[in-house]
Structures are given as structure tokens and as C-alpha cells.
């Protein structure tokens, strides 16, 4: 039953030990020791028992039960209500004791109205049921019980406090979320109701309807991540009389712009993070340099930070902000438009040197791109570029000079690659020739020419040589 009773006795032996109390013959307390005058007093928990007169007796190691007059004890029907307060919708457990053994048709009332009926007690007069607190205005409500044999007057009512309640929809969201709040069980037509978040008023005052209900909306202000207390109070209802709701603030980040090229200044705005925390900005998992250099959140969990988009492949990338506890990421798109192909400005069919073994210099017009431009160049002996013997990457100038090349015909081409690794088509292949004649052939020609000249001179000399008579040889001029 949960109640206690106290037994006081005299006339036992001085200092008598092992005294026990019985309830309907069953020991309910033992180990009692009398005083030197033979008296003692002890309490015991009243066991579950049906209504009616029960026998309380006692005995000790020297005093037999038969010598101790019995005492009649009549347990009072009672109920226990758990919990003792709550908002509409709360499930309440009511336990009854000391009703008539096996009594059926027991009814539980809430505020004078039947909350549960057709209950049957056990052979010890106990029973237990649950009911749900109905919608009603806030305040005290009596909970009672009665049966065919146990009248309502015999059972002391227990007061249940109907508390006001607020609920939020949604129950979580980011800073700036519009939240609908419903209040119930406030005072009938109660005025001056104020909605609060963490004790700070949100919006104007509200008036409840005749049933104590009301609705209102508010926008989640700058707040740190985690649960925040949503409550209300009015001209009648105090903050302690309201079952509060929790609203969970979730971190969020936004980015501007959402796309760009290498070097684009990207601004990040964050809300709902932990307060006064250092943050790190990652781009595809790697930390980037930011402005400010050591960003952190405000006391309300907000942040503003910028960074320059690093060189990366065109397409989608992940930008992440973390405060060590919470992390949020957002997509950012790198420019994926390739630059135009370079235009060759070197003279087509240019010739370098006479004998070969000289370098050639090639040139093309500069290409512009928001992500900056680098150049790739190939040189081969065939127009198919099956096996280019010169392959240069990452050139930043628009001119290139080879090493010394043997005499022959060479083909070269160039393409532009921007900072996002977008590649242009190859330029049109251009031809350059090295040397006009092999050096050996040149020497042979020179020698032959020399010999021809020498031979011609000799012939001329011979023709002009005088005879013994002092006259030129025949055939002379």
C-alpha cells in the first residue's frame, strides 16, 4: 500500500529481544528490542490488503503472541497518481489499494468525469490502470475512484496539475527557419501570452482561445548549435507551469558565388555553429588559406570568411567548414570551359640555318582565360605526331626555342591549358626547316667549283703564253 503504521507496546520483558510485529498473522517487522522498562515503539509498511478489519499482533523471545491483545486495523481505500502533473496527452498511472477484495466495476474519474471504468480489484483489493490526460485548460484536476462497494467518499482524491504545453513544428532547423508553435492548456482566453526562446521573447503577445489553445510563428534567430528551450508565459500561466519544447538548431553554410574560376574570391557565411570556436575551411578535403587567416565563430555561432579558389579540375568540388564538432559542406563549381586553341604566329615554312645543327624558335599568339593559361608544345619529324621528341608542359611564355636540330623538316604544335586543367584543341601544325644543304655536299661543291676555276685559269694562261717567235700560240686573240 505504501503507507506506514506505528505500533507502541508496553509490558514486555526488560530488554527483551527478537520482538516481531505481525499483520494478519504475517511478520511485517522483526528485530525489535524492548527498553529496560519493557516498552518499545516501531513502524511498519502496511502490506497490500483488502478493506476490512485486519489483525495486528506482536511477540518476542519471552512474550508469546497469545498474551498480547490483538489490535484491529482497518486500511483506508486510497489511490496513487503518477505523475502528479503533465500536459494534455500525458499518460497517467493510477494505483488503488484497500478496495474490497475482488471488487469489480471500479471507476477512475478525472475532474469529475470518467477517465477509466470497468476495473477489477485483486483478492488483496489492489488494481492499477492508465489513462491519457484529455485536452483542457490548465489548472488543478481532482483524480478519484469508486466502486460498487467502495464509495467515492471513502477514497481521498488526489490533485493532478494540468500544465500548459508548447509544441514546435518543425522541431529542428537552421537559423532563419520559420517555426509554427502551438500552445495548449493555457488559461481560457488568457491574454498577454509571450513566446520565448531561451528566455528571450519572440514576437508580440498572444491571446488564447476559450479552450486555452493558441498558435504563433517565429523565425529562429542567430543561435549556437544544439537544443534550445521554447516556452511561453501569460497573464495567468507562469513559466514553471508550462511543459517546454526543445528546438534543435542545425549548422548551415552558404557560399557566394557558387561557381567561378581559379582565383575567384569565394565568400562563406555560416550560422548555427558552436559559439566562439575556431573554424577550418577545406576545399576537397585540403585546408585553404582564408581571410581572416584564423577565422572563428561569434558568440551566436555565426561566421564570415573568404578564400581564393585554388587551382583544381573543372567541375564540382566540396567546400567544408568545421568547428571541430560540427561540419557542413556545400558544392562549388570550377569553370569547365576550355580556352581557345592558340594561333601560330611563326612564319609558315620557316628555314633556320644553311647546314643544320641549329635551334629553331617558334611563336604563337597569347590566349586569355579567367583561370590563367599554360601551354603544352610538341615537336616531331612527322605531321602525325606519333612520337614527338620534344614534349613540353606548363609553359608560360608564347615563344619556345629548341636545342640544336639536325638538318630536316620538323612539325610543331601547341595547345592552351587553363588553371582548371581545361585543354584547348591543338593548334594547326606548323612546319619549320633546318638547313638547306648538307655540309659535305657544300664542301664538295666548293671543291669542285674551285677545281673548275683553277682549270679555267690554267686554260686561259696557256692560251696567252708567247711562242719562241714572240707571237702567241695559234688560236690566240
Image (cartoon, rainbow, N blue to C red):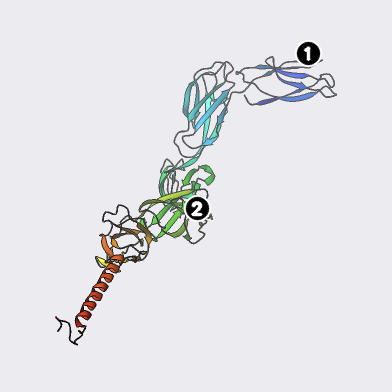
Q: Where is residue 419 in the image (x, y as percent from the top left)?
A: 37, 58
Image-quadrant location for residue 266: bottom left
The one nearer the camera, 76 or 333, is: 333
Q: What residue is pinned by disc 1? A: 64
Looking at the image, residue 133 lies above or below residue 295: above
At x 47%, y 36%, the residue is 88
Looking at the image, residue 160 lies above or below residue 439: above
* Separation of marks 1 and 2 at Cα, in angstroms: 71 Å
Left or right: where 461 falls relative to 141:
left
The one nearer the camera, 446 or 410, is: 446
Q: Where is residue 91 in the image (x, y as percent from the top left)?
A: 49, 31
Looking at the image, residue 305 lies above or below residue 1: below
- The kind of secondary structure element at disc 2 is strand
Image-quadrant location for residue 384: bottom left
At x 21%, y 79%, the residue is 462
Q: What residue is pinned by disc 2? A: 200
Q: Is there any visible trace of residue 178 in the rendered image?
A: yes
Quadrant occupied by the C terminus? bottom left
Q: Is there any visible trace of residue 345 in the rendered image?
A: no
Amino acid at each position: 500500500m505504501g503507507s506506514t503504521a506505528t505500533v507502541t507496546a508496553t509490558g514486555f520483558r526488560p530488554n527483551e529481544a527478537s520482538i516481531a510485529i505481525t499483520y494478519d498473522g504475517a511478520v511485517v517487522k522483526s528485530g525489535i528490542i524492548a527498553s529496560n522498562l519493557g516498552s518499545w515503539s516501531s513502524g511498519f509498511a502496511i502490506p497490500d490488503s483488502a478493506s476490512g478489519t485486519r489483525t495486528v499482533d506482536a511477540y518476542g523471545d519471552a512474550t508469546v503472541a497469545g498474551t498480547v491483545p490483538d489490535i484491529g486495523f482497518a486500511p483506508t481505500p486510497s489511490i496513487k497518481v503518477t505523475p502528479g502533473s503533465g500536459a494534455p496527452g500525458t499518460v497517467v498511472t493510477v494505483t488503488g489499494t484497500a478496495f474490497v477484495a475482488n471488487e469489480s466495476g471500479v471507476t477512475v474519474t478525472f475532474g469529475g468525469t470518467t477517465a477509466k471504468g470497468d476495473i477489477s480489484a485483486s483478492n488483496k483489493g489492489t488494481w492499477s490502470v492508465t489513462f491519457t490526460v484529455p485536452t483542457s485548460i490548465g489548472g488543478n484536476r481532482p483524480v478519484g475512484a469508486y466502486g460498487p462497494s467502495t464509495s467515492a467518499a471513502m477514497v481521498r482524491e488526489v490533485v493532478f496539475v494540468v500544465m500548459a504545453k508548447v509544441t514546435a513544428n518543425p522541431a529542428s532547423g537552421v537559423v532563419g527557419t520559420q517555426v509554427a508553435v502551438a500552445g495548449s492548456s493555457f488559461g481560457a482566453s488568457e491574454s498577454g501570452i509571450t513566446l520565448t526562446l531561451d528566455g528571450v521573447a519572440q514576437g508580440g503577445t498572444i491571446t488564447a482561445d476559450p479552450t486555452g489553445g493558441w498558435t504563433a510563428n517565429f523565425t529562429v534567430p542567430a543561435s549556437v548549435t544544439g537544443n534550445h528551450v521554447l516556452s511561453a508565459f501569460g497573464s495567468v500561466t507562469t513559466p514553471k507551469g508550462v511543459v517546454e519544447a526543445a528546438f534543435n538548431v542545425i549548422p548551415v553554410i552558404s557560399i557566394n558565388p557558387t561557381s567561378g574560376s581559379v582565383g575567384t574570391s569565394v565568400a562563406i557565411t555560416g550560422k548555427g555553429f558552436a559559439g566562439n570556436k575556431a573554424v577550418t575551411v577545406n576545399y576537397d578535403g585540403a585546408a585553404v588559406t582564408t581571410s581572416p587567416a584564423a577565422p572563428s565563430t561569434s558568440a551566436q555561432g555565426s561566421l564570415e570568411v573568404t578564400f581564393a579558389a585554388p587551382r583544381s579540375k573543372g567541375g564540382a568540388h566540396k567546400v567544408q567548414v568545421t568547428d571541430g564538432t560540427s561540419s557542413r559542406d556545400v558544392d562549388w563549381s570550377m569553370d569547365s570551359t576550355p580556352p581557345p586553341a592558340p594561333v601560330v604566329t611563326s612564319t609558315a615554312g620557316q628555314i633556320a640555318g644553311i647546314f643544320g645543327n641549329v635551334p629553331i624558335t617558334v611563336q604563337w599568339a597569347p590566349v586569355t582565360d579567367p583561370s590563367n593559361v599554360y601551354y603544352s608544345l610538341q615537336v616531331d619529324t612527322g605531321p602525325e605526331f606519333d612520337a614527338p621528341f620534344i614534349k613540353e608542359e606548363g609553359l608560360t611564355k608564347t615563344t619556345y626555342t629548341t636545342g640544336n636540330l639536325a638538318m630536316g623538316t620538323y612539325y610543331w604544335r601547341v595547345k592552351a591549358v587553363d588553371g582548371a586543367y581545361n585543354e584547348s584543341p591543338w593548334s594547326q601544325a606548323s612546319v619549320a626547316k633546318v638547313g638547306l644543304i648538307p655540309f659535305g655536299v657544300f664542301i664538295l661543291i666548293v671543291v669542285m667549283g674551285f677545281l673548275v676555276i683553277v682549270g679555267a685559269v690554267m686554260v686561259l694562261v696557256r692560251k696567252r703564253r708567247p711562242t719562241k717567235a714572240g707571237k702567241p700560240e695559234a688560236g690566240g686573240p
